Amino acid sequence: MRNKLTTMALVMLCLLPLQAQTTSDSLSFSLQEAMNYATENAFQSKSATYDIEAAEKKVWEYIAIGLPQVNAEAQLTDNLSIQENVITMTPEDGSDPIKLKTQFGQQYNWNATGNVSQLLFDGSYLLGIQASRIYVNISEKNKTKTQIDVRQSVAEAYYVALVAKKNLETFKKNLEVNEQTLKETEAYFNNGFREMTDVDQLKLMVNNSRNLVLDAERQLLISEAVLKYSMGVSIEQAIKLVDDIDFLLTPVEAYLPQSNTFDVKSHIDYSILETQEEAQKTIVKNERVQYLPKINAFYNISYIEFGDEFSNMDNTNSQMLGLSLTMPIFQSGKQSAKVKQEQINYLKLQNDMRQMEEGLKQQLMVAESNFKNAQATYLNDKEGEEIAFRIYDRTRIKFVKGLASSTELSQNEGQYIQSQISYIQSTLNLLDTHIKYKKAINQL
C-alpha cells in the first residue's frame, strides 16, 4: 500500500535538495499570482528577456555598418640590425665589376595613419537591418512561448502542491481515527471484550497510517520546492498557497471545451514559424543582391618620420581620397547555387508550416480527448472514494460495536486508501489535462 502511494505523480517530479526555510516572512500566492510572478521572475523568462536585449543590440550593430567608420593606427620601429644589400657596379673602362654592400633604411622610423570610410551602396546592408529586426521579433515571440511554458509548469506544480496538502490532511484524519479506534479496542481488550489479535491488527493499521502521513509530509515539501523553483523563488523562501484545491477544481469539473473557436494561426508556435518564413524571404533576397556591386568612399592620411638619430628625424606625409568598387563578374555558378539553396530552404519552411498547422489540430484533438476522459475518470474516482469511505466508516462503527472483525476493518480501510490514491491521481490528471488543453487552444 505504501509503495503504491509513493508512485503518485508527486514523486514523479524532480527531487530537489530541500533546505530549511529560514525566511521568516512567507510570500502568499494565488494560482494566478504565482503564474504572473513566474512570467517575469522564472529563470527561463529572464533568459528570454536577455535574448531580446541582445537582439536589439544586434540591430544597431547592422545599422552602424552603414555609418562612417574611422580608424587610426600608429607604429614605432627601432631597426636593431638593418639588412645589407649588395650593389654591383661596372666601371666604364672595362675593369672588373665592383661589389658594394650598403644599407637601405634608417634605424628609427614611426608612422601614423588615419582612415575614414563610408558605405555608399551595398544591397545587403538594408536587408541586414531588416533581418536583424525580424530576429528581434522572433526573440520576442520566443519569450512569449517561454512564458506560456513557464505558466504551464507553475500551474502544474501549484496543483501538485495543493493536492499534496489535501492528501496530508486526509491521511492525518485517517491516523486520528485509527488511533482512536486502537485506544477503544485496547480498553475493550483490557476488560476482556476483545482479543489480542484485534489490538495487533489495529496497531498495524495505525503504523501504516503513520507511514502514509510521513510520506505525505515529504511529498508536500517536495512539491513546494518544485513550485518555488518553477517560479524563480529561492528554495529557502517560505511561501503560502492562497487558493484551495476544491476552489480550483470546481470550474474545471464543469469546463466545456471550446475547440470550435480555435484559430491555428493564432497559436504562438505557428506565429514563430510565420516570422521565420519572413526571415527566410529576406535571406533569399540577400543572396540575390550579391550580384550587385558594392561601393565605398574612403579618405586616408599618413604621416611618417625616419632617421638614424631619434632626435633628428626627417618626415613625410601623404593623403588619399577615393572610391572603391567591388563587382562580381564570374563565379562559376557559385552565387546561383546559393540563391537556389535558400529558395529550397524557403519551400521547406512552407512545408514545415503546413505540418505545424496539421500538428496543432491533431494536438488539440488529443488534448480535448484526454481532458474529457480525465473529467469522466475523475468523477468516477471521486464517487468511488466517497463510497469506499462510507463502507469503511460503517465497518469501523460495526467493529466498535463488535459486529465486524478487525480483518474486515483492515480490508475495508485498505480499499478506502486505494480509492483515495486513485482519486488523487485522477485529480492531478484532470488538472494537468485541463492546463494542456488550454495551452493547445492558446489560452494559457
Image (tube, rainbow, N blue to C red):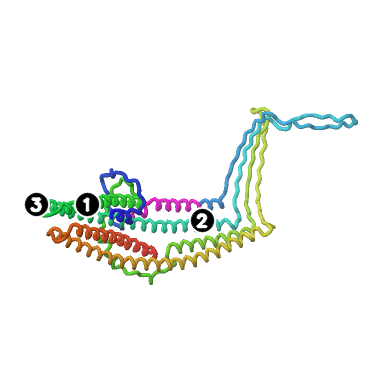
Left or right: 173 as drawn, with respect to 232:
left
Q: Secondary structure at mark 1?
A: helix
Which one is earlier in the sequence, the residue at label 2 or at label 1?
2
Left or right: 162 as drawn, with respect to 60:
left
Residue placed furthest toward the bottom: 260
* Residue 242 is one of the magenta-drawn residues: no
Residue 192: give x, y in percent of width and height: 10, 52
- What amino acid is at disc 3? Asn
Rendered position, 307 above or below 120: above
Magenta highlight range:
34-58
Rendered position, 284 above or below 199: below
Q: Secondary structure at mark 2?
A: helix
- Residue at screen point 43% across, 53% down: 48
Residue placed furthest toward the left: 191
Q: What residue did someone put label 2 on? A: 132
Which numbered marker is on residue 191? 3
Closer to viewer: mark 1 or mark 3: 3
